Image (spheres, rainbow, N blue to C red):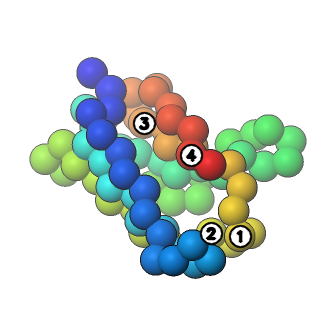
Amino acid sequence: FGIVAVSLSCATAQSDEFTIQGKAAAEKVYLQRINDRGAAVTVDSALVRNGTFELKGKTSDGGGFYQLNFLNGQKTVLI
């Protein structure tokens, strides 16, 4: 049930590019940015295939608080 593993990587320490890979029991994963009002705004999503998922992209603001929201209701905060 839930997340088996999640890994986060960046190209360099100053890079705004990211890759998130993980294993999950859910069918879909949502990447959400936590805005200045504390609300979660979906910025990307991925289908879980054979128990794994991958999200790639760039941060639009140079950082911030993000969370992975799994279709089964489980959430994991990323900083």
Query: Relative to 65, is 38 above or below?
Result: above
Q: Secondary structure at mark 3?
A: strand
- Kindly report the distance in space between the C-alpha atoms of the residues bearing marks 3 and 2: 20 Å
Q: Contact (CB < 8 A) between labels 1 and 2?
A: yes
- Kindly report the distance in space between the C-alpha atoms of the residues bearing marks 1 and 3: 24 Å
In terms of sequence position, does the residue under pointer 4 or pointer 1 come before the other? 1
Q: Amino acid at mark 1?
A: Gly
Q: Secondary structure at mark 4?
A: strand
In terms of sequence position, does the residue under pointer 4 or pointer 3 come before the other? 3
- Kindly report the distance in space between the C-alpha atoms of the residues bearing marks 4 and 2: 12 Å
Residue at image position (27%, 33%) is 4
The residue tagged 2 is: 59
On the picture, is 73 further left or further right than 25? right
Q: Secondary structure at mark 1?
A: loop
Q: Position of residue 61 (x, y in %)?
A: 74, 69
Q: Amino acid at mark 2?
A: Thr
